[in-house]
């Protein structure tokens, strides 16, 4: 594993642990999701990071899978552009949710992502842009009583 990948994994682990510690400031219902997802994700990233430094643990883990997660594989230019494009889309979604709020940004993101990037039909893009936020809103607000982020605008 390259040093850049290790540095990124350390940074990611730091962000995940920060997310877990920040979730302690939330109310009882609001902290469940960031805490649980942060803990599980941090455990996975920590294991991958430990594997990158220890050949014994890496070889032990490789017994369970045919191809290691940490094998060196070179992506083509087209694959790199596609991955960067997806990262940019989801980063944009995160920023939009932060500023516009969940109920505005999520349907907007879903529609644009499905229509422009995934080149799906108008029908599917509109249905998904309406259904997914409605299901999430119903689940979090009505069932779990967890408020969704409203944004700054």
Image: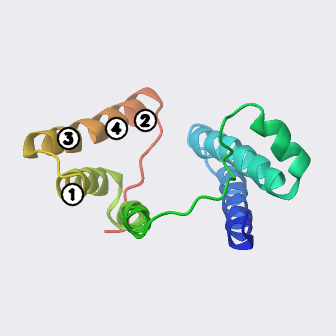
Q: Are marks 4 and 2 in contact (CB under 8 Å)?
A: yes
Q: Give me the disc on residue 140.
A: 2
The mark that comes first in sequence, 1 or 3, is: 1
Residue linked to disc 1: 112
Which circle, 1 or 3, is nearer the viewer?
1
Secondary structure, mark 1, is: helix
Residue at 74% of width from left, 65% of height from top? 6
Rounded to the nearest angstrom, the CA distance separating label 3 from label 2 is 16 Å
**Residues at discs 4 and 3 in contact (Cβ within 8 Å):** no
Give the image quarter of residue 77: bottom left
For discs 4 and 3, the disc positioned in front in the rendered view: 3
Quadrant placement of the C terminus:
bottom left
Looking at marks 1 and 2 on the same chain, the residue that comes earlier in the sequence is marked by: 1
**Cα gap from disc 4 to disc 2, whole angstroms:** 5 Å
Kindly identify the residue that appears in the image at 23 percent across and 56 percent down.
108
Relative placement, left or right, of 38 versus 119 is: right
Does residue 25 appear in the picture of this structure? no
C-beta proximity under 8 Å, tags 1 and 3: no
Secondary structure of the residue carrying numbered label 3: helix
Q: CA distance from mark 4 to mark 3?
A: 11 Å
Residue assigned mark 4:
137
The residue that disc 3 covers is: 130
Q: Which residue in the rendered view is the most extreme toward the top?
A: 143
């Amino acid at each position: 594993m390259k040093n850049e990948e290790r540095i990124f994994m350390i940074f990611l682990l730091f962000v995940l642990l920060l997310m877990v510690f920040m979730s302690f400031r939330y109310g009882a219902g609001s902290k469940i999701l960031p805490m649980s997802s942060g803990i599980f994700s941090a455990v996975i990233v920590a294991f991958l990071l430990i594997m990158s430094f220890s050949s014994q643990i890496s070889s032990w883990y490789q017994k369970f899978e045919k191809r290691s997660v940490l094998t060196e594989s070179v992506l083509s230019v087209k694959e790199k552009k596609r991955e960067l494009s997806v990262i940019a889309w989801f980063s944009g979604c995160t920023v939009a949710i932060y500023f516009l709020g969940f109920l505005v940004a999520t349907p907007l993101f879903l529609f644009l992502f499905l229509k422009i990037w995934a080149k799906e039909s108008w029908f599917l893009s509109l249905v998904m842009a309406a259904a997914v936020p409605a299901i999430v809103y119903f689940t979090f607000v009505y069932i779990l009583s967890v408020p969704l982020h409203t944004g700054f605008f």
